[in-house]
């Protein structure tokens, strides 16, 4: 017999996950996932699917009928939108302000798009004028944006981009994986044609399910590429008249047929992940979307104040920082990875490292979802200061904690 | 405030899922999934990933290094293998004996393959000679097979196909979603270059994670198409010299880089689904792969005997039936959907309907994974007979149950 039989049951150590995500799941989400399965066409299951659609309309702030889950991690949602919307040869414009802008380019290239980019240095975002100028020049079919790029912690303002896209006949998509729930999102008011997200950031769930919403115009563009599988098609089914979508799993037309009234079989919905996604949205709407965003802003502010109180610098344009994550410039003579390792090993607190041009230069600290809480902020600040002191970095005793407490006390005052 | 706030917490009714899958998850798998999350590069997490690789080598019976999970449902695993292995224009041969053969064609077409098929009537399988003849004629780069097609309940013998493929220089893939765990699988001994599966059939877990294994030859073919994302590439990274893979999410080269020693960031591993997949494999190896297959054969035989004892006919070539699912010919003058509805509503037992040419003609009854148990078989037989009797179908009192008990009694005798 193989020695793999000797592996014990799963028993992960307790961790306080204060990086850029994933973070700790809300225990209510974990409990929802431990529910027993039901059949995929059980009326209770299709009822839950309809509820998920309604719940995520509330989260995305949209009336879009086609608001549903893609069964995969957040980049599955991105690829589903892109491969369903982009026909080979279509021009797309991607404003790149961090790693996840590069990811949109990378995925769009694999959809055989003609990819055009504009870039700002990591730590900045674009003005609407910069984007409109590029749209005038490139004349893309789609504008692909990242709302919050965790690689730089920046939040791209989207409010004015929908009107620009409409003026130029451009479809408008944003990847809200890292930002949704922690920062404002108004899919309809901002004129978004597609938004995708994930559960593992501000939504307080595990990675593995990607909520997406599609405007009626985007749905209509996708429906023109409709295909029905041979194994399940009947005489009444007609394909669309535009080029087919070059993926089966990510064919949002098929996914719409599965989530819609016809319930045409596609994949077998990932039931436990759907239970998780439903619970994430349910507890968010119970708290209220405005309240959640306010909570993320408060704890994000307290973390920034504490870090600054420790004598550390915050990375990037703080006016355009996401509420839920910050970059901390690693001080000179401090070994960034040694600090992360001691935090993890001795305190069981995880903070994030960085990619690309910021590798080794900043830590990324998140305050999001279930961990956007005062106790998480204060524990992290106290532990980080202790570790920094141990590695020889001097701080003013009590200053960091007082700075954070000041934020909380100001909030508590009427 | 929206009325979606009024949705209660998840509370699915108890169901006994005796269809073609998904079936009830093993409670140990559900408990594993309710474990709290850890960071994706936490040494405990990467340790679990390595354990998952080792465990699924045991399940697939392979020494393949590249044995890992694709984060999506079983068709995500299929598409990952196909889009990573098939270059546009490559010829593939698909022996179609049910709906899931059509699905392989459908996915291969979306990979821009030149798709060739051979077909047998639903309810039959292919001889090795039929497949070798077609390979001689078509000269495909890949042979794409389904091992067990739940649409017809048939199991395609694969033992001799690997040698045929080697003789003709063909890469050999099988979709083992419905068959793995309930029927023999010898990935190495049978010369398979790629196998993909899902958790929701004989593995006793929820849909949403797809275990795959790749032979060294398949891994080398895929590595020739290697790409590194711009956002994370460094000077030491070289791309392959063959055409890139036209999907980012399903790029198995990138997924290998993420599961391999370099741990290059790709998606954020779906932690809870990985916990589920690990527990599925762990408890299977604890029982022993041979014992599990024997268990599926026993309960499958008992179900068949009971159904025949009720005076009903079994669909298709019973010699090539999967152990874990059977087709029951719906008797004349019985409304198939009314029976299913009463079983579900009054007994909370789900059995399956059918697709395509078999729609309305057979029910599909599964005995798989956690539900490959005597109590599940006997409860289902007793309930089905009661419902059939209520709808006017005559049976010999006690005969069905006795036939099933006879199977169990014969097994219990030394």
Image (tube, coloured by chain):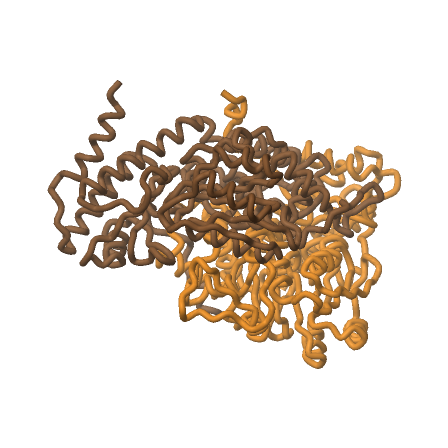
Chain colours: A orange, B brown
On the picture, is A58 further left or further right than A154?
Answer: left
- Point out residue B81 in the picture as x, y percentages from the top left corner: 59, 46
Q: Residue at x 39, y 27 (%)?
A: B291
For the C terminus of chain A, which image quadrant?
Answer: bottom right
Count the marks: 0
Residue A373, can we see it?
no
Up-down: is A66 above or below B306? below
Residue A71 percent coordinates (x, y): 53, 53
Task: Choose between A256 and A127: the one closer to the eye.
Answer: A256
Quick one: B362 or A327, which is closer to the camera? B362
Q: Is residue B252 above or below residue A278?
A: above
Residue that sits furthest to the bottom in the current view: A167
Where residue A76 appears, x then y in whole percent? 60, 55
Location of residue A119 (image quadrant): bottom right
Picture quadrant of residue A197: bottom right
Residue B312 in sight from this viewpoint: yes
Query: Residue B260: horizontal and vertical position, in percent?
Result: 68, 36
Side of A187 where A138 appears, left or right:
right
Q: Which of the pair A202/B63 is nearer the observer? A: B63
Residue furthest to the right in view is A332
Q: Residue at x 66, y 73 (%)?
A: A171
Residue B309 horizontal side relative to residue A412, left or right: left
């Amino acid at each position: 017999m193989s020695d793999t039989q000797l592996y014990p049951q799963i028993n992960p150590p307790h961790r306080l996950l204060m990086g850029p995500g994933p973070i700790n799941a809300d225990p209510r989400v974990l409990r929802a996932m431990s529910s027993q399965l039901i059949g995929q066409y059980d009326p209770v299951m299709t009822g839950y699917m309809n509820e998920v659609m309604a719940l995520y309309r509330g989260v995305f702030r949209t009336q879009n009928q086609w608001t549903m889950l893609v069964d995969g991690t957040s980049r599955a949602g991105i690829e589903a939108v892109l491969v369903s919307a982009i026909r080979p040869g279509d021009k797309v414009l991607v404003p790149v302000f961090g790693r996840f802008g590069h990811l949109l380019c990378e995925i769009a290239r694999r959809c055989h798009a003609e990819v055009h980019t504009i870039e700002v240095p990591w730590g900045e975002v674009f003005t609407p004028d910069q984007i409109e100028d590029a749209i005038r020049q490139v004349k893309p079919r789609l504008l692909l944006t990242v709302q919050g790029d965790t690689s730089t912690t920046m939040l791209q303002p989207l409010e004015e981009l929908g009107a620009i896209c409409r003026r130029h006949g451009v479809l408008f998509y944003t990847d809200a994986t890292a930002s949704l729930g922690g920062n404002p999102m108004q899919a309809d008011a901002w004129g978004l044609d597609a938004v995708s997200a994930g559960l593992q950031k501000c939504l307080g769930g595990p990675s593995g399910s990607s909520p997406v919403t599609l405007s009626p115009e985007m749905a209509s563009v996708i429906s023109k590429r409709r295909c029905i599988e041979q194994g399940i098609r009947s005489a009444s089914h007609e394909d669309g008249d535009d080029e087919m979508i070059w993926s089966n799993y990510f064919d949002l037309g098929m996914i719409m047929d599965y989530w819609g009234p016809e319930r045409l079989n596609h994949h077998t919905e990932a039931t436990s992940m759907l239970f998780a996604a439903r619970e994430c949205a349910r507890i968010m709407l119970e708290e209220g979307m405005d309240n959640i965003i306010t909570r993320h802003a408060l704890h994000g502010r307290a973390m920034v104040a504490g870090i600054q109180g420790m004598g550390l610098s915050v990375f990037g344009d703080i006016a355009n920082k996401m509420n839920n994550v910050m970059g901390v410039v690693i001080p000179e003579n401090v070994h960034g990875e040694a600090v992360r390792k001691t935090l993890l090993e001795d305190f069981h607190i995880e903070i994030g490292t960085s990619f690309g041009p910021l590798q080794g230069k900043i830590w990324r600290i998140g305050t999001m979802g279930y961990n956007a809480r005062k106790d998480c902020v204060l524990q992290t600040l106290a532990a980080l200061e202790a570790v920094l002191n141990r590695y020889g970095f001097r701080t003013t005793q009590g200053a960091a904690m007082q700075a954070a407490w000041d934020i909380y006390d100001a909030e508590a005052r009427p």
